[in-house]
Image (cartoon, rainbow, N blue to C red):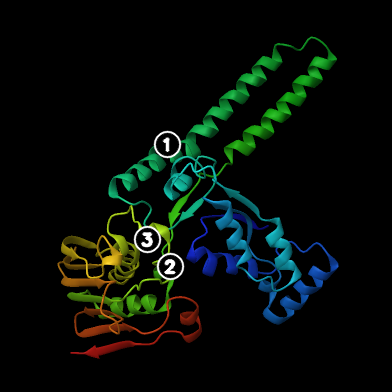
Amino acid sequence: MSIGIAIIGSGIFAREEHLPILLSQPNPNPTTESTQENASEREGEGGKQGKTHPFILKALYSRTLHSAQSLLASVPAADPDTTKRIEEIDVYADDAGVGRKYEDLCAREDALRAGKHVLSEKPIAGDLATAQEMVRVYKEEILPRGRDGQAIECAANGQREVANGETTNGNTNQDEDKKERKEKNKKEKKNKKNKVTPLWGVAENYRFLPKYLLVAEEVRKLGPVKGLRVCVRSLVGVGSKYHQTPWRRHPSHEGGFVLDGGVHIIAALRLILGPENPLTTVSAMSSLHQPHLHPVDTVDALVRTRSGAVGCISLSYGAAPGTNGTVFELRVEEALADLEVMVGMFASEREKGVVGLGLQVV
């Protein structure tokens, strides 16, 4: 059985990563002779995993119909199966200009309230107050209703319906009606009690990249982190695909590109440090080097972890041309773990593997 997926948003990552992966999977439910033959061939080439896929894309939502349709049109249909799946995808849009934000769609009024699981992008909101309100709504309104409220309320309603039915048994037809109502109520209560609480997760792809997983593993072997240095230098140029997105050119979220890109770097650092040793103290200053990257493109910070390790984090997405690079340097008990990121983040990394990891005993 496949899990139905709906994509909210038609941005760069949805176009280049999410949608192609979902549509390139084997047909989850082969129904024709040709698709069954194709599935059998894929099974022979790649094992049983080639026959089915756990996910199937059912719907795509964007703020405009044009962007949603453009997203689907951007994916080349390599075979009849892919073409058929694209044609079957439902497309939704808010062309009326309501202006609902991404966080509204995911966490406040639509998906979670409808009982759907949500895996959202990060950051989850443009400011801290909105993010805290979203978490509050989920914890106080969504979780209790899904876990306890719905089942208890439905069970109580079902008992009342059965009781009402028992008062009407005056003849054979009424007895049969009562029996049918009991069976119906029993099935409804069972289904509603088994409803799964809608889960909300925040996706972070850096926590699954091989290079960071490897560094985290090696650092844990060597002992507690005593010091750290993280340095990122990149230039988001005028006219680049990331700069061309309207929400980046006219940001409503605090932090601009520092927040947009920095959230990945901090996620990688948190993975390496481990859940038992998070950052607890931060003192930082921000600046703007490239006017087109307003409001800020650079931040320099001093940090301290729970264990007392002190270090610096310097992130700049408005660096001088030719200075691109990312370095994680962590001093542990008897060694210096140094990771210099020299490969692409996504498809190219999957092909080339991990490079640039050095371990020096000092």
Q: Which residue is mark 1?
A: 141
The answer, for residue 182, to whether it is visible in the render is: yes
**Alpha carbon separation for disc pair 3 and 1:** 32 Å
Question: Dot 2, crowdedness within 10 Å: few (<14), some or many (≥20)?
Answer: few
**Mark whose residue sits in front, 3 or 2:** 3
Q: Which residue is mark 3?
A: 248
Which of the 4 image quarters holds residue 230?
Answer: bottom left
Depth order, front residue of 50/239:
239
Element type at mark 1? helix
**Tag on residue 205?**
2
Residue at 71% x, 70% y is 51
Depth order, front residue of 286/228:
286
Left or right? Give the position of 210 relative to 29.
left
**Mark whose residue sits in front, 3 or 1:** 3
Amino acid type assigned to the residue bearing label 2 in the image: Asn
**Alpha carbon separation for disc pair 2 and 1:** 28 Å
Question: Dot 1, crowdedness within 10 Å: few (<14), some or many (≥20)?
Answer: some
Residue at 30% x, 88% y is 358
Tell me, yes or no, whether the two marked residues, 3 and 1, touch with CB atoms within 8 Å. no
Q: Position of residue 262 (x, y in %)?
A: 30, 66
Element type at mark 3? helix
Q: Position of residue 84 (x, y in %)?
A: 74, 62
**Mark whose residue sits in front, 2 or 1:** 2
Q: Earlier in the sequence, mark 3 or mark 2?
A: 2
